[in-house]
Amino acid sequence: MAQNGSMRTRDGSAKRRGGSRQDRNRPVKIRKYRKPLNLNIGMIIFGVVFVYVVVCVVIYFQTSHIVRYEVQEGSLVTNNIYRGVVIREEKVVNADTAGYVNYYAREGERVAKNDLVYIVDETGRLSDDLQAASLDGNTLDDRELAEFRNELASFIHGFDSRQFETAYDFKYSLQNTLMKLANSSMLENMSDIGEDGNIVNYAYAPETGIVAYWVDGCETLTAGQVTGDTFDDKSYEKKQLLSNTLLAAGDPAYKLSTSENWSIVFPVDPERGAKLQEEGYIKVRFLKNQYEVWGQTELMTNPDGNTYLQISFTNSMVSFLSDRFLDVELIVEDETGLKIPVSSIVQKEFFLIPEEYVIPSGSSGRGSIVRQCYLEDGTISSEMLEVDLYSFDEETREYYLDSSILNAGDILYKPDSQETFTVSRRATLIGVYNVNRGYADFKQINILYQNEEYAIVKSNTRYGLSVYDYIVQDASTVSDDQFIKQ
């Protein structure tokens, strides 16, 4: 090292400490240090697996999936509960004179022609005179008590809290029963109080019938007049007729049901209604009291364009005398057979071939045909083809053959004959794709009944399905003769 403050470099040249001022003021450029890329084999494998999974997920959602369904025996639980309107032969009897009405006949009681039904007090003092005559001390005999017990038991058994208005009907029925019993005693005392200035008029039944003390304006309704508006609860009004109320001349006093023949009418799906009408007679359970009775069915289309089913009865009318609407359950046998999803059902087109041009192979569902063909030199010849037979029409005596085997215009030969038939006519069959053999094989089905999700089809048909067969659950996911991966 030199003594003048300089220093020597490795090559022997001298260099001043600290360098020159110009060198000291020169900016220093700082570069970012880059770490070397260290490849981790674990990260590479993870990335490859992740990409593979993403690709598989995308392919899965873009590909239609074929789901197999095992055919089982079963039945469809159908909704057989309907709300219907009651149709009766009813006649409203109006009051001849104004006054306070007191009923004598009990509601639900049958009266003969000219029987006393009620009395009219024109002055309004009859009720006070009756109390003064100490009629309120009467007691009920065993027969009268039995009537109350029967009414109570019937109400308790059939009461539904969702239809609380029936409690008021029961209340009015008991009131009328009490009034009838009180009025019976009243009539026995009429000789004692009838000459005290009271003007009393007696009203008698114009004809035989069962008495009811309510009106709703539907007394003249017929089955053919029922529409959707008939079931509108907001527009329906039922008016109870009570004893000791003031009536004007011409007001409804009571009504008579003049026949035991009655019916109930309710809207129904046309297809379902047609099946019920085919039954002729069906058993009906009334949800009000669980009473069961047989009725005759009749299907009709009313002015509103909707389909209605009328079930007619010849008895038990008095049990529902206080009801205009009833909830009923139809007790019918559920269709049983092979239960399949509706999504499995498909239609397929076939050629119709006369019976005499097909050679069936026993009960295997296959057969043979002889078709005209041309050799290489252009001469006409024939060939025998083995084909699947998909159905046979007993009326036209024709087989259904797959349109993928034949073409329109093909000429078939009748076995052991020179007669020919030109393939042309087509028809469709309803069926499903059977996959027992590993490919989509069409099988005809005979639908007995179906709802939105499932259908019941006839089992063990010659060209159809059998229990435990496997079919395609969604027919739209396959095509004819497509191979199915197991």
Image: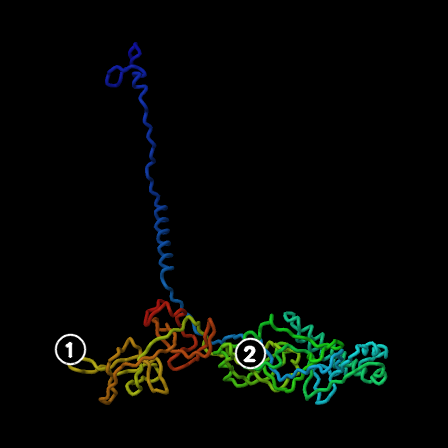
Q: Secondary structure at mark 1?
A: loop
* Vertical side of 439 occupied by 59: above or below: above
Q: Is residue 408 left or right of residue 435?
A: left
Instruction: Tell me the kind of residue under disc 1.
Output: Glu
Q: Residue at x 73, y 86 (%)?
A: 204
The residue where tag 1 is placed is 376
Q: Is residue 409 visible?
A: yes
Please state if 447 lies on the left or on the right of 164 as rendered.
Answer: left
* Of residues 274 and 363, the one drawn nearer to the viewer in this rendering: 274
* 448 vs 95, nearest the viewer: 95
Residue topped by disc 2: 226
Residue 117 falls in image quadrant: bottom right
**Distance of label 1 from label 2 (alpha carbons):** 74 Å
Q: Quadrant of the C terminus?
A: bottom left
Query: Can I make out residue 174 in this image?
Result: no
Q: Nearer the viewer, residue 391 or 41?
A: 391
Earlier sequence position, callout 1 versus callout 2: 2
Q: Residues within 10 Å of mark 2 (few under 14, many from 20)?
A: many
* Quadrant position of residue 84: bottom right
The N terminus is located in which quarter? top left
Instruction: Report the coloring of the rendering.
Output: rainbow
Residue 210 location in percent, x, y?
68, 85
The percent coordinates of residue 332 (x first, y second) are: 54, 80
